[in-house]
Every structure is written in C-alpha cells, then in structure tokens.
C-alpha cells in the first residue's frame, strides 16, 4: 500500500513549515503568508529521493589548507560597472541572484550584458519566463541590440531548460528571468511557492556547477525590498546583487550584497537613458551636480561604497513645529541613526531641537549605510538650525559616539583624494589614531584638514563662522 502523503503548510515569506494552517507565521510575523503544499513539496524531495540507499557512508580524502590554488577563471561582461560589482567578470560555474524593484531596469541591464558577450563570440542564452519571445525582441530592438546573436527562449520548465542548454557547447552565460516563474517536476506545488523556488534553484545551481556555465537568476522583491522566496536561496548562490534606484531619478545603483569571488558592498552606477543603461565612471560629479552652495543646511559627505570613494550632498531642514510631537523624516539614511545624532546634539552640543521638525535627505536618491556620515549629517543639522551656510569647498566625514566624541573611520586617504580631485579645498574629519598619527607625519595630505575630537568643536566652528559673517 502506498504511503499516505500528508499536506504541509509553508510560509511564502520565510519558508517556515507547519503541520496545520495558521493566520500568522511565528517565524517572520507575516500574516496570511502560509499556503498548503502537498506531496513531495518537502524540502527533501527531488534529488534526495532519487539517490540509492547505502548501508554506510563513503570515505573521501581530507586535504589541508596549504596547497596550490588558482584564480577562478572569469568571463568579463564588457560593462565596466557590472564587472566592478562582480569582482572582474562572471566566474565560470557561478550563480548570481539579481533582485530589484519592478521596472528598475534588471532586464535591460541583462540584455545589454548578454549582447556584449554574444558579440565577442560567446554562447549566451536568455530564458524568459515572464515575457514572450516577441516581447524580448522588441526590447532588444529599442536598445539597438536586435542583431546580437543571443539565444532566446520563453520557457518555465527547469528540466526542459537544462536539457536544451546542455546541447552543444556549454553557454558562457545563461539568464533565468525570473526564478519565481520556474517550476520543476520533482516538486508538486504551484510555481512561485517557496518549495518550487528552492527546487528550481537547486536544479539550476547543479547545472551551473557541472557545466561551468555562469547563471544569473532574476528574483522578484517584496514590498520591503527583500528578495521574494526562501532565504535559503541567497545562501545557495555564489553572489547576491541588488539593483536599486528611484523612478524619480535617472540613475541606478548596482550593489553587491554577497560575493564569494569578489568584494562585497561594491557598487556600480548607471544612468537610465533612451538607449538603455549608460555607465557613470565618476558618480560623485553626478550626485553633486546642481547643488546650491549658498543654502544653509547642506553638507558634502565623503563616503565609501566598497572600494570606491563617493561624494554626496546631505540636506537638512530644521524648522519650528506646530505639533505636540515634532516630525522626524529621513530619506536615504537610517531613521534610528538620525535619532541618535539628534540626541547627541541636544545632550552634548547644547542645541535645542525638541520643538523643531527635522527633515534629512541624501540628495540624488542614494542610500547611505556607513556610520561615517554622522559628522556630515550633524553639520547639516547645525547649519540649518543656525541659518549659516557651510563652506562650499569643504567635505565632512566621521563617526559620532554617544558621548559626543568623533571617532576615526577607515580609508581616510581615499576620501580625501576623491574630494581633492573634484576641487574641494578642505575637510572636517576626526582626529587620527595615535598609531596612524605617528606613521603619517611625513605623509602629504591631498587637501587641508581640520581634525575635531568632539561634537562641541563642530558646533563652535559653525558658531564662529556665523559671528564672522555677521
């Protein structure tokens, strides 16, 4: 008699499995995200079910850390910003998960990358599970890539895709757009469910590792910006890349979140145009273009995104409030980080911000995550509250502690060199550490720096400038 299969209930947000339906997932807190999946929808279905049983395990050799190592072979895409994020090109047999909001330009970027590779004689396949072949061809014609020898298909069955791509020489790159539309015959559930996404990703990863084909899986994102589907897929792939941007701005940010073969937190900057995505080799000029140098409440932050220095303008507006609870709004920065900076300014800087609305914005739509932006944000807030404009040729960077102390940050030389290259004359930065100060006595700085050790020094600096101006 066949063994009876019991249904399982799987959360579509985080992949948690329950033996009965629940309205709220206990793992991630999502409501109405638990869906019934029957039969072989278990995570162990598929490859494990086809393995022959063994009475005991197989002994395999163990090796040490020392030994000959070789650099992983790569295939450059021909797009410098994309190669920067991936670490120099696509590693043979690697799998990249690319996520981004709808309409942000994921398919456009991948179409340009596949066309550039195909024109160099590489075999490239673009498998679309969301669009028909005619729709993909229309987009390629709009981009001026209609003559590129890219192999194109519209298919969602993973087994059929792998069988087709296995014919002839292995492709150098295969695009799967998107992983949420794929389904495998080893799993008895609807496409897009957690189990189907996991099973389809496993099959495509095995294909990449056995043939040496670099595979890019396009993933949808949830309303909070996370890649939809089970989180285990992000652990299975070799790299996770997010494509960020705002439809109100014309530039896009390609950011590496995870990369086994290259640096993480690296970014590539693109500009959306009529002919597709255009590379931006110097993004600092783009983010600083059109800034108003004489307006109080603006400060230029010298930041780092991976190995690339980046200058961006931070805007602040401090205005008296008519509400019982003042507003605190921030765009492009962490809300809790702004609250901490405001508390330090009140406790140690002597500023009274309790009866003021505070608005903070990172110009251009870029999102900053590093704590080195504390000093620039504080300078913009002090400038807006005092009504005194900051020097237009000065950059700011430094981490602020709860005691009001300004702490040193990494890669100070790279930040200063980028500022000097763009014409800035001075920088407000933390005091160097003792070990660095001893070793940098003979080191020539690219621009004049004013080191401050406490937030009161910054407040006094801006106050003295206001008295001189009056």
Image: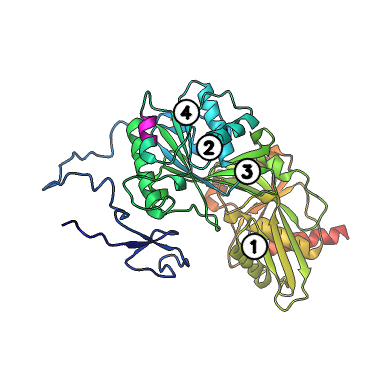
SS class of the residue under badge 4?
strand
Alpha carbons under labels 4 and 2: distance apart? 18 Å
Could you say which disc has been placed on residue 454 in the image? Answer: 1
Mark 1 vs 2, N-terminal side? 2
Q: Which residue is mark 4?
A: 124
Alpha carbons under labels 3 and 4: distance apart? 25 Å
Q: Is residue 143 visible?
A: no
Mark 3 vs 4, N-terminal side? 4
Q: Position of residue 382 (x, y in %)?
A: 74, 63
Mark 3 crowd level (few <14, some 14–19, many ≥20, 10 Å Cα): many
Tell me whether the residue at label 2 lies in contact with that at label 3, contact meaning CB atoms closer than 8 angstroms: no
Frontmost of labels 1 and 3 is 3
Alpha carbons under labels 4 and 1: distance apart? 56 Å
| Span highlighted in magenta in the image | 161-166
Frontmost of labels 1 and 2 is 2
Could you say which disc has been placed on residue 132 in the image? Answer: 2
Residue furthest to the front in view is 1
In this rendering, is residue 435 above or below 274? below
Mark 1 crowd level (few <14, some 14–19, many ≥20, 10 Å Cα): some
Name the quadrant of the C terminus.
Answer: bottom right
SS class of the residue under badge 2?
loop
Mark 4 vs 2, N-terminal side? 4
Alpha carbons under labels 1 and 3: distance apart? 36 Å
SS class of the residue under badge 3?
strand
Q: Position of residue 201 (x, y in %)?
A: 39, 45
Q: Is residue 163 magenta?
A: yes
Q: Which residue is mark 3?
A: 252
What residue is drawn where x is 51% and y is 43%? Answer: 130
Mark 1 vs 3, N-terminal side? 3
């Amino acid at each position: 008699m066949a063994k009876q299969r019991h249904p399982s209930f799987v959360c579509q947000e985080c992949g948690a499995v329950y033996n009965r339906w629940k309205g709220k997932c206990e793992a991630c807190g999502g409501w109405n995200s638990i869906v019934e999946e029957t039969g072989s929808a278990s995570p162990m279905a598929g490859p494990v079910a086809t393995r022959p049983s063994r009475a005991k395990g197989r002994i395999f050799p163990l090796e040490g850390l020392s030994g000959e190592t070789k650099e992983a072979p790569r295939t450059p895409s021909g797009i410098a910003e994309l190669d920067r994020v991936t670490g120099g090109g696509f590693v043979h047999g690697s799998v990249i998960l690319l996520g981004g909001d709808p309409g942000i330009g994921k398919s456009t970027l991948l179409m340009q990358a596949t066309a550039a590779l195909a024109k160099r004689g590489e075999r490239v396949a673009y498998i679309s599970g969301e669009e028909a072949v005619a729709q993909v061809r229309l987009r390629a014609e709009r981009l001026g890539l209609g003559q590129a020898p890219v192999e194109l298909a519209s298919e969602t069955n993973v087994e059929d895709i792998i069988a087709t791509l296995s014919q002839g020489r292995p492709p150098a790159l295969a695009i799967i757009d998107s992983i949420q539309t794929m389904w495998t015959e080893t799993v008895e559930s609807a496409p897009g469910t957690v189990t189907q996404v996991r099973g389809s990703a496993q099959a495509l990863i095995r294909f990449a590792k056995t043939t040496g084909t670099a595979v890019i899986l396009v993933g949808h994102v949830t309303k909070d910006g996370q890649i939809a589907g089970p989180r285990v897929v992000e652990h299975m792939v070799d790299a996770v890349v997010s494509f960020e941007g705002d439809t109100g701005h014309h530039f896009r940010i390609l950011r590496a979140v995870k990369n086994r073969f290259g640096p993480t937190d690296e970014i590539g900057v693109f500009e959306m145009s009529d002919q597709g995505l255009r590379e931006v080799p110097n993004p600092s000029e783009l983010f600083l273009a059109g800034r108003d140098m004489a307006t109080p409440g603006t400060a230029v932050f010298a930041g780092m995104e991976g190995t690339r220095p980046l200058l961006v303008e931070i805007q602040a507006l401090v205005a008296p409030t008519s509400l019982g609870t003042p507003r605190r709004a921030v765009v492009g920065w962490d809300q809790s980080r702004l609250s901490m900076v405001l508390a330090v300014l009140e406790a140690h800087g002597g500023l009274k911000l309790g009866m003021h609305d505070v608005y903070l914005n990172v110009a251009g739509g870029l999102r900053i995550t590093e704590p080195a932006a504390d000093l620039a944000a504080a300078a913009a807030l002090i400038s807006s509250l005092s009504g005194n404009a900051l020097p237009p040729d000065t950059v700011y960077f430094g981490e602020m502690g709860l005691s009001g102390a300004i702490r040193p940050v990494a890669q100070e030389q790279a930040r200063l060199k980028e500022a000097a290259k763009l014409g800035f004359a001075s920088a407000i930065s933390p005091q160097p550490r003792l070990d660095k100060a001893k070793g940098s006595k003979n080191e020539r700085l690219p621009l004049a720096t004013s080191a401050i050790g406490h937030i009161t020094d910054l407040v006094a600096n801006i106050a003295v400038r206001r008295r001189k101006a009056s």
